[in-house]
Amino acid sequence: MKRLRLSVLFALIVGVASGVIAAESDSTWTAIVGGRFETLVSVEADSPGFRWNHVSRSPADHTRFMLDLRGGHSRFGKYYAKAAARWDDLERTEGSVDFRFEQGNYTWANAGSDGELMVSLYANERRYFTNSLGVRLLDDDAAAQFDDHYGLRVDYTSTTASIRGAMIGAVIDDGKNRRGLGLADASWGGNVPALGDMSGGVGLRYVSGDGTVDHTIFELTGAWLDRDGGGLFASFQQAAFGEGLSYPSGAFSFDELDLFRPGDWLPENSVVLVEAHTGGTKTRLGKFDAVHRYRATGQEYTDPISAVAPGEVRTQTGIYWNHDRYAVDGFVVFDEWRRKTAQLQTSQRLIVHGRASLRDGSEGVLRAVFEDNSDSGGDFGDESFLHASWGRHLRKLSTSVHVLAGRIDRGEFGSRFAAETRFNATASTSFYGRLVTDESKGSNDAVYIRIEFRPLDHVFASFGFGRSFIGDDPYVVEDPDIGMTGEADRVYTMTVRGDF
């Protein structure tokens, strides 16, 4: 019902605005209607008595019908709205399937000689990114978890004074709680002779709580960039709690001043981020670039819509290398995570990666991963392994082979092998196959085959065998889902999609 009210409200706003503006203007408005129908049917061989275990109205049925409307005017604004009916929710397994509003926006922009102003009224869209360097207001992945989120965003960018600003007012609803969000931030910058580009910023964030405790977060940012691409970035955020907008308290402990560990002397209700780039150093062996990132979260820092945990310290150091003459590159990254609770928890991970490409279209990759989770306080084992792969990519045929050996799957020693290939038989027909084997597990679950057809420009169909999510990691044999490849029934899938 809430989504229905939201869709009706949004449609009324767009309709009234369009009617008023159209009455005052002789210019042409555009309106484009598009749609998509897609069905993904999955059937599973269950037992001799009942071989096909499938219910059409089940969460495994991803049938979807979608319509979208877009249009507007370059002077008075543009709109977009999308609605769909789908069968993949548990509450819709019985009865009729509703056609519901999913997302939309109405955006107006005015660009002048001094700058550009943009105003957006949106619903269920990911419009929360800002120039914040520390803990974000709301990450894109986190926004998708809410049932509804809608609001108003205003952005201004100056072309003469290097000033940028943003204001966001939104409401997020997870089905149980509804919170209000508010953000205002501004940044400015310019070139300083002999020093390079420098910038700074301030921000204010407000998150309503459960009616008694609200959260206010202040942020200061600074950045410096030299002509070679190197730079230094810093962010300091401090939180306050109370009713309404509050000012944060918490003192600096300068008696413990350590420039390399600022989290030890900053207020306990703060988050500090420092990141440094070298910008690249050219040598006969190639170009080297180093990046160091440090983020520390105080014990009393709390953000109800952020995944950042209090007392968490994370350090990342990476060295990246590539050669201009030869098609080779690589990197070494060390990642350390610490958290102060009843006892100190630590986790360390080192990745060494190298890649070489040849003129015949082949490519070799060698990766070594060393991980120590012995003091993490969780149920994670140490993972240390060596991964080698070789592949060849041609216009119609692409193949690759992967071999991994070491301590994987909660620290148990073992090996894995994978092979995948894609063959484009014609301009409208292709074949994809993947085989993954594990030393301790084995079944048809590690085999995935898919045949794709595109008989028309706007029609797509595929037939598959196996579970597509096992081995779909970019590094294939490093996919954690491979640990699920125990005995399983055979699965067949069919997908049909049409766009109009």
Image (cartoon, helix red, strand yellow):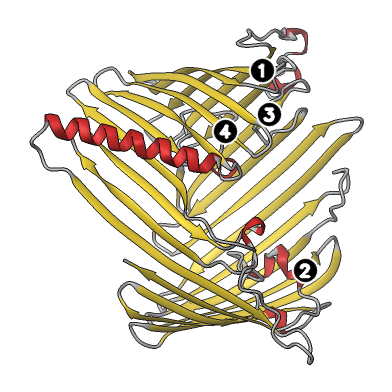
Label pair 4/3, CB-CB below 8 angstroms: no
Quarter holding the C terminus is: bottom left
- The answer to whether 314 is drawn above or below residue 331 in the figure is above
Q: Secondary structure at mark 1?
A: strand
List the residue tagged with mark 1. 214
List the residue tagged with mark 2. 483
Which residue corresponds to the image point at 71% horizontal and 26% vertical from the top-left? Answer: 297
Label 4 CA crowd tier, 10 Å (few <14, some 14–19, many 20+): many
Residue 491, position in %: x, y? 66, 81
List the residue tagged with mark 3. 304
Label 3 CA crowd tier, 10 Å (few <14, some 14–19, many 20+): few
Alpha carbon of mark 1 to alpha carbon of mark 2: how far?
42 Å
Which residue appears farthest toward the right when viewing the image? 342
- The answer to whether 12 is drawn above or below residue 193 in the figure is below
Which residue appears farthest toward the left when viewing the image? 26
Which residue appears farthest toward the front when viewing the image? 95
Which residue corresponds to the image point at 28% horizontal and 33% vertical from the top-left? Answer: 16
- The answer to whether 425 is drawn above or below residue 126 in the figure is below
Residue 110, position in %: x, y? 23, 28
- Foreground mark, 4 or 3, reads 4
Alpha carbon of mark 1 to alpha carbon of mark 3: how far?
9 Å
Residue 448, position in %: x, y? 62, 80
Q: Secondary structure at mark 2?
A: helix
Alpha carbon of mark 4 to alpha carbon of mark 2: how far?
36 Å
List the residue tagged with mark 4. 172
